[in-house]
Image (spheres, helix red, strand yellow):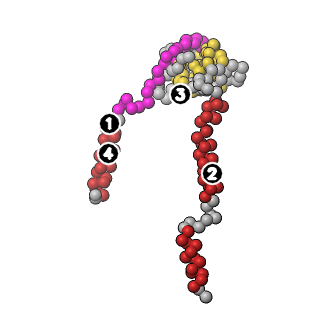
Amino acid sequence: MTARRRIAVVLAAAIASLGLATPAMAYPPVGVVHTEQVPAGPYAITVGFSTWPIRAMRSLDFTFAPAGGITGKSGIVAIFPPGGRGRIRPLARHPRKRDVWGLDVESLDTAGVYVLRFIVDGPQGRGEGNLRGVEVLGQPGPPLALSWTVGSLPLVALVTLIVVAWRRVRPGRRPLLPGCMIVTTYASLETP
């Protein structure tokens, strides 16, 4: 195959792959399954959740849609876990839903009741509001320590197998081929 034909085949494959790429192959949009309304001063914010009920250590998307859109507005959201310090995040566009603010694949670490506090600055001044009572259920599945223990068993078995095989063979102490020893012995007998 000549170089020109190879280039033509590569270009044809690249064009075909681009032509077959459809919008359906892009990241799926955020599916909001539950919403809550939060009055933040003069702004009403609709908080959307991609998973409901929320479980600890499971990824989900948050969307924050102020009434009138996000144009000309900025702000922060603070997420307060039960009995802990809040994590402060700027309100930025959601990467997959560009017309609202949001957090992409965020997880809440512990079970309990959370509070989300919003501070929004916009054309009507500053507004503050809280979403209280966001209940986060326990982590699904077995406890994390048990999951890691069961998941690491194949690795432990593989390491054990390698150590046992290494000890039986003991490379470096035996010659690679048994005939090599004989050849070197005869060679040493023939030289004076």
Residue 109 in the image, given as x and y percentages of width and height: 64, 26
Query: What amino acid is labelled 1 in the image?
Result: Leu
- In magenta, the rendered stretch is 22-48
Residue 55 in the image, given as x and y percentages of width and height: 59, 21
Asked if residue 11 is positioned above or below residue 23 in the image, the reply reads below
Taking depth in this image into account, of 150 and 104 the one nearest to the observer is 150
Q: Which is closer to the viewer, label 2 or label 4?
A: 2
Disc 2 or 4, which lies upstream in sequence? 4
Using the image, tell me which numbered label, if any, was put on residue 104: 3
Disc 4 or 1, which lies upstream in sequence? 4
Residue ID at (54%, 17%): 52
The answer to whether residue 11 is visible is yes
Label 4 element class: helix
- Residue position for label 2: 164
Q: Which is closer to the viewer, label 3 or label 4?
A: 4
Query: What amino acid is labelled 3 in the image?
Result: Asp
Query: What amino acid is labelled 4 in the image?
Result: Ala
Query: Is the residue marked by circle 4 packed among few (<14), some (14-19), or many (20+) residues within 10 Å?
Result: few
- Residue position for label 1: 20
Query: Is the residue marked by circle 1 packed among few (<14), some (14-19), or many (20+) residues within 10 Å?
Result: few
Using the image, tell me which numbered label, if any, was put on residue 13: 4
Query: What amino acid is labelled 2 in the image?
Result: Val
* Mark 4 vs mark 1, CA separation in Å: 11 Å
Snapshot quadrant of residue 179: bottom right
Determine if the magenta segment contains residue 23: yes
Disc 2 or 3, which lies upstream in sequence? 3
Residue ID at (59%, 46%): 158
Query: Is the residue marked by circle 2 packed among few (<14), some (14-19), or many (20+) residues within 10 Å?
Result: few
Residue 11 in the image, given as x and y percentages of width and height: 31, 48
